[in-house]
Image (cartoon, helix red, strand yellow):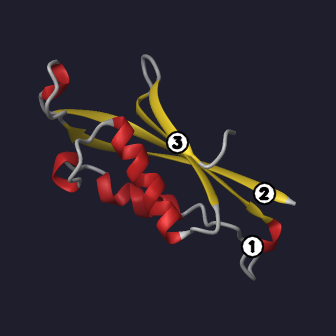
Amino acid sequence: MILTLYTEDYFDAAHFLKNYDGKCANLHGHTWKICVWVRGDENQKLPNGILWDFGNIKKIILEFDHKNINEVLAENPTAENLTLIIYKKLKLDYSHLQFKIRVYEKTHPKESYCETGDFNA
């Protein structure tokens, strides 16, 4: 039987876009929202019954929270690049599971996001 888990969390961070002609070329901040879907077979659960610990998202959040993302990443800190980086980090540590990642640059007054992953939810 296939299991799909979902969790989300937020972090506050600043960034600016390199090689961009617009106001986002200036340092500014967002409350970012990270959504993670995890899919795996029930046979992949750990002996304690957990497929993937929801607390794992905190490890990623701590890398970016209250920081200038430009100083954390080698890549231009676009929503697209941040989404791919989070996905690749999770796949590196949990290659036996499937992931879908969605990164919201902001959620109010409108939603703007990028997503990638192994499946559609």
Is residue 72 toward the left or the right of residue 83 in the image? Answer: left
Task: Point out the frontmost of discs 3 and 2.
Answer: 3
Q: Given the image, on which type of amino acid does mark 1 rest?
A: Lys
- Foreground pick, 40 / 63: 40
Which residue is at 14% across, 27% downward? 25
Where is mark 3, residue-wise?
Answer: 116
Name the residue type under label 3.
Answer: Thr
Evaluate if marks 3 and 1 touch, with contact meaning CB atoms under 8 Å apart. Answer: no
Question: Which badge, 2 or 1, is on the more N-terminal residue?
Answer: 2
Q: Is residue 11 visible?
A: no
Residue type at the position of mark 2: Leu
Q: Do the residues labelled 2 and 1 touch (CB within 8 Å)?
A: yes
Q: In which quarter of the image is residue 14?
A: top left
Mark pair 2, 1: CA separation: 10 Å
Verify CB contact (< 8 Å) between mark 3 and mark 2.
no
Q: Where is mark 1, residue-wise?
A: 45
Q: Position of residue 104 (x, y in %)?
A: 44, 34
Residue furthest to the right in view is 1
- Residue 3 in percent (x, y) is at 78, 57
Number of residues whose C-alpha sits closer than 10 Å to that of mark 3, classed few (under 14), some (14–19) or many (20 or more): some
Residue that appears at 19% across and 33% down = 17
**On the rendered image, what quadrant is the N terminus found in?**
bottom right
SS label for mark 3: strand
Q: What is the secondary structure assignment of the residue under circle 2?
A: strand
Q: Mark 2 points at which residue?
A: 3
